[in-house]
Amino acid sequence: MTYPQILCLIVAIPFMGAGLILLAGKYHNLRDTLSLLVAMVLCGTVYQLIEPLRQGNFTQVTLLEVTPSLSLGLSVEPLGLLFALVASFLWIVTGLYAIGYMRGHHEKNQTRFFACFAIAIGGAMGVSFSSNLFTLFAFYELLTLCTFPLVTHHGTDEAKKAGRIYLGILLATSVGLQLFAIIWTWNLAGTLDFRPNGILAGTASNRVLSILIVLFVFGVGKAAVMPFHRWLPAAMVAPTPVSALLHAVAVVKVGVFTILKVAIYIFGLDTLAQLGSTPWLRWIVAATIILGSLVAFTKDNLKARLAYSTISQLSYIVLAALLANEFAIIGGGMHIAMHAFGKITLFFAAGSVLVASHKTNISDMKGLGRRMPLTFAAFFVGSLSIIGVPPAGGAWSKWFLGLGTIEAGEQGLLAVLMVSSLLSLVYLLEVPIRAFFSSPEPDQEGTGIQEAPWPCLLAMGISGGMTVGLFLFPDFLYEMMTMVFAA
Amino acid sequence: MNAMGLLNYWFVIVLMMIGFYVLIAQGNLVKKIVGLNIFQTSVFVFYISMGKITGATAPILDSDWSVYSNPLPHVLILTAIVVGVATTALGLSLTVRIHEAYGSVEEDEINEMDE
Amino acid sequence: MMNHLPVLQVIIPLLAAPLCVIVRNGQIAGVIAVASSWVSLWMAWKIFQLVQVAGTISYNLGGWLAPVGIEYRIDTLAAFVLILVTLVGAVVTPYAITSVKKEIDESKESLFYAAFLLCLSGLLGIVVTGDIFNVFVFLEISSLSAYALIALGKDRRALIASYQYLIMGSVGATFIVIGIGMLYVMTGSLNMADLAILLPELPSNRIIPVAFAFLTIGVCLKLALFPLHVWLPNAYAYAPSAVTAFIASTATKVAIYMLLRICFTIFGPDFSFVKMQLGAILLPLSVIAIFSMSLVAIFQTNVKRMLAYSSLAQIGYIVLGISLFTNTGLTAGILHLFNHAVIKGSLFMALGCVMYRLNSVDLESMRGLGKKMPLTMGAFLVGGFSLIGVPFTAGFISKWYLIQGALEKGLWPVALLVLMTSLMAVVYIWRVVESVYFSEFGGSDADEITEAPLGLLLPTWALAILCLYFGINGTFTVLAASSAAANLMGVGS
């Protein structure tokens, strides 16, 4: 097979998977096996692209010309490949977890759930390999629409209300601001292709480009920069695997990934660094980092706390894009992976607690660690990564981000990063500390070990292990990110 | 040209305004059609006037005459008159149907019934 | 025979209409209507190809040379609109066969087809003719038959709607006649191409601007531009399903075509847009239309009425494109003229399917219909997404060009407004989607509601697929629209 074909295949596999899942809907075991199998095939196929990329093979393929000036195209570049690898690998893990969770929790409409899930991954693959902004936007919207049934999965009034917030904010920002920015970009540059060093340099005055970057940062609602963050906590009504893969990895990372792509390949780092609005935006994003952490404190519901932690962490990556230097971008790209592995572990643990002991509030988890030691150990490891201390992978990305702030001469932002890390230390570690060191409520004592189903544990083990593994072996991520600049 | 020379056109405007006013102000569906007819008639007069040339005769070749009226506007307006008749017929038949369905041809009464 | 295509295009449906009356049998009349509309589509396609190769076609009716005789003149724009009108006609007539049986008395079926074909031939006539008085005649043929078609609606309010449309439409047509008369007084010609040459040579006077005003206002009444739109919502809402689908997609579009002809071909862009500043009038009106009508659409409970208001907003988009007076803007206008016709056609036809089974298109009665009529609602969803302008649907492409056009002129608030109102479209379409897909079925006769018959579904899906096709491969429409736009902008400059 040629590389363009592999590329098309990667985007097609999840959609074909969705079809297979729908066909096999009645046979639950077959359906779940298929879902796992498709995930593995996808991850394996994405893996095939690494070697050619190392040899400088930036495959590009145009699928169709929508109009003479708009085309649907795919291409491989290091940042996209990195994201695709993370997303497709975590799909396997989440697939495993979802089987345990959905059955353990007796969810309904599982076929629709797995099918939409596969389509969502297809959307993420499309975004990561898109060769121009139009393609990216199309897959971005697909992702928004196909995750709506997942958010409203329970069909309750609460879920519907959350679904409306979800769809409303994401569509409003993407159509109202992002699409506007995209069309404006086309108007200025005459193309929407992602190119090294950008396409906007010198096409318009500093002021116009300054407005444009603001439109992009807020228009990519999936990056959840305040004040357009409300959809993410709202989406937490979804079943935990959805929150784990989509609202900690695929969907939100599509957002920050889009901003990174725009910063690197549309504006170009040099242009971006000189814009009048960039310093302001950095501080707005920094405010999201701090505020997200502070709100996380106030949340007693574990998933809500994790959601606000995600909002805060996402802005690290947006900040990386806005710092617009090599260190920061390396840090931002690595943080996509590091945060993904860390946060998914946390969500897995939260879901396991829900399945095994039906608890959602942190205050109810006193002493639970004695009954679910493995779950809370995983939670602990995940927390370390989010905080950014060894031996978890998050340490590396934060290190580079820190370097990036210094390189950009923004020591104040370095302080913000530090403070936010401290805050996350407190709000995350509170959970395992309560679980392990508080004595349980009298009525819940002593029923021995009561862990979640084994697929959940296995999934947690893998993602937690990877978090540590990425601390020990970050070379691959580093290599990928440096290749962004080699091109 | 003096004002008298344009007398036809003044009449056209007056007729047009009368027709238009009836069309807008009347709530009775039949009277509205009457208004529409007056409105259209003004246009007929307008066309007929503009084909007429002072001192000219009907456009039939004749050795005594060298100046003829322009027949084209008259032909055109013949078409428009036919269209006007068709419109009136359709409008009146609609009014009949409306009367059958509502028992009234007064606009405000009909609107009340549909509320 | 190929030489006579321009006239055959009009003549065939015109002759088929009395044939329908003569046979007096609904079935046979239906077959005649389908056959003649399909032949029309084929001819339109042939003409389009011919125009692509040979440029503007000129046909002298009865062999009399222009400007004395009546000339049929078909350029790219006309050929493009011909395809649109015949395409919608060819899809709606087979649809009508099933839908009319349910909605119209058997005794009137053959008359329905006769009126339908007359309307079709009138619209086609407006497009092909190069003679301005001829435009008026064809306009009245199509309008009179449209009034009759709308009055055939089951609801008694259809009669009132038709009556209102008749009064407004006749006033508009009369305005147009006045304008034509003034032009004739000044130039002595009725041929559009001839007028285009004669008008600029006239010394400056007051009559030409007045004629221009009469013509544009008359046409704007016909195309239902805000604030001359009051006749439209009721007419669309209460007409029979097939009629709504046909008229919504063609009648206003042809009126817009007339506007383009008058402004660009006859008076010339310099006169219309530079001297008369037409753009400065149309732009605010269209902006108000887009915004206010989208807003009104959100609060409708009758889905057909909701789409009627949405049509008014979409007409605003088209006129907005024209008012920008740039190549891109004009391309966007013509493109949306085509795309919106296809989109609205599919939406109204899907609603016709709902009407067929439910006898109602109220939001409340459509609850949970997604499970009962998946194919129908699927087509509605495709059309709805297209209306919003989701990527890979026809609506996206026209909005893309429209926003480009606005940005080119530096009108970024207008560009933003277009996006904002797209979001309003999301709201009104989503209300239907939520009711249809995410609510439980509420009706008592739950078992009786099944998927619409194939005779309705196939045509509906034909247009729905076209919505997608022109969104995925917009090359054909974009090229046609941009060459038509370039043609218009080039004339007279």
Image: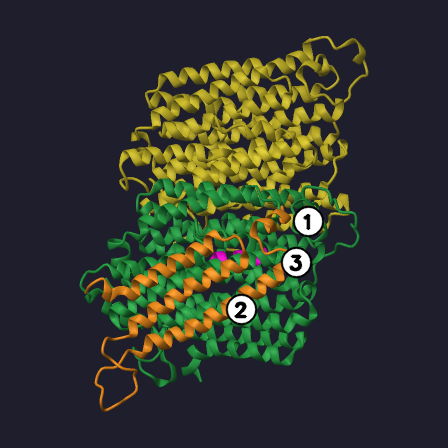
Chain colours: A yellow, B orange, C green
Q: For the residue carrying disc 1, how many other residues have a C-alpha within 10 Å: few (<14), some (14-19), or many (20+)?
A: many
Residue tagged 1: C370
Disc 1 marks which amino acid? Answer: Gly
Compared with residue A98, is residue A55 higher up or lower down, i.e. above or below?
Answer: below
| Spatial CA span between label 3 and label 2 | 18 Å
Residue A416, quarter of picture:
top left
Name the quarter where the N terminus of chain C is drawn.
bottom left
Q: Answer whether residue C374 is visible to the viewer in this image.
A: yes
Residue tagged 2: B89
Task: Depth check: give the residue in front, A284 or A58.
Answer: A284
Residue tagged 3: B101
- Left or right, C302 with respect to C74, comes to right
Compared with residue C464, is residue A77 higher up or lower down, i.e. above or below?
Answer: above
**Image mark 3: chain:** B
Q: In the structure shown, which secondary structural element does the residue marked by tag 1 occupy?
A: helix
Sooner in the amino-acid sequence: mark 3 or mark 2: 2
**Image mark 1: chain:** C
Residue in view at x 32 percent, y 79 percent: B71
Q: Is residue C344 magenta?
A: yes
Q: In the structure shown, which secondary structural element does the residue marked by tag 3 occupy?
A: helix
Q: Which mark is residue C277?
A: none
| Spatial CA span between label 2 and label 1 | 45 Å
Q: Which residues are magenta?
A: C339-348
Q: Main secondary structure of the magenta part?
A: helix
Residue C456, quarter of picture:
bottom right
Q: For the residue carrying disc 3, how many other residues have a C-alpha within 10 Å: few (<14), some (14-19), or many (20+)?
A: some
Q: Is residue C422 magenta?
A: no
Q: Answer whether residue C467 is visible to the viewer in this image.
A: no
Residues at marks 2 and 1 touching, judged by CB atoms closer than 8 Å: no
